[in-house]
Image (cartoon, rainbow, N blue to C red):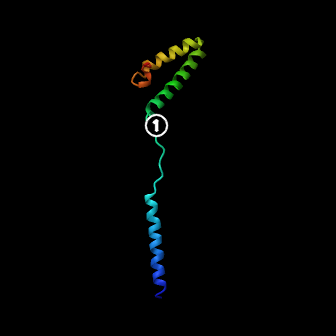
Amino acid sequence: MTTRFPLFILAAALAVAGTTACHFIRSKAPKESPNITSDVEAGFKQRWIDKRAAELTATGTDTTAARQQAEKEFNVTYSYLRSAEPARH
């Protein structure tokens, strides 16, 4: 019995040390884009204008005129978005 007790203590110590060491190892999460809001807004604007321009074209409006009208409608409807603001260069 006396030879088993030290082996049991050693095994228990290794098990505890092995599980606590895993808590200190952290995987690095990928960093999010700092411009995520503007990326989402730009994607929304593009999809909305494409859909509205297709609707206007289906009713017989010229493609170029339909796109311009869709952009104007977007800027009026979603004026509170940063992507609705004209590009500043």
The total of numbered circles placed on residues is 1
User: Observer-nearest residue: 43 or 14?
Assistant: 14
Image point 52% across, 14% down: which residue?
68
Image point 48% across, 27% down: which residue?
42
Residue 71 coordinates in the image, percent (x, y):
49, 17
Residue 62 coordinates in the image, percent (x, y):
59, 11
Image point 43% across, 32% down: which residue?
37
User: Observer-nearest residue: 18 or 47?
Assistant: 18
Against 32, residue 59 (above or below) is: above
Q: Determine the secondary structure under disc 1.
A: loop
Against 8, residue 31 (above or below) is: above
Against 24, residue 36 (above or below) is: above
* Residue holding disc 1: 33
The quadrant of the rendering that contains the C terminus is top left
User: Observer-nearest residue: 13 or 45?
Assistant: 13
User: Observer-nearest residue: 86 or 53?
Assistant: 86
Residue positioned most to the left = 80
Residue 51 coordinates in the image, percent (x, y):
55, 23
Three-letter amino acid code at the position of disc 1: Ser
Residue 73 coordinates in the image, percent (x, y):
47, 17
User: Mark 1 Cα within 10 Å, few/some/many (few <14, many 20+)?
Assistant: few
Give the image quarter of residue 61.
top right
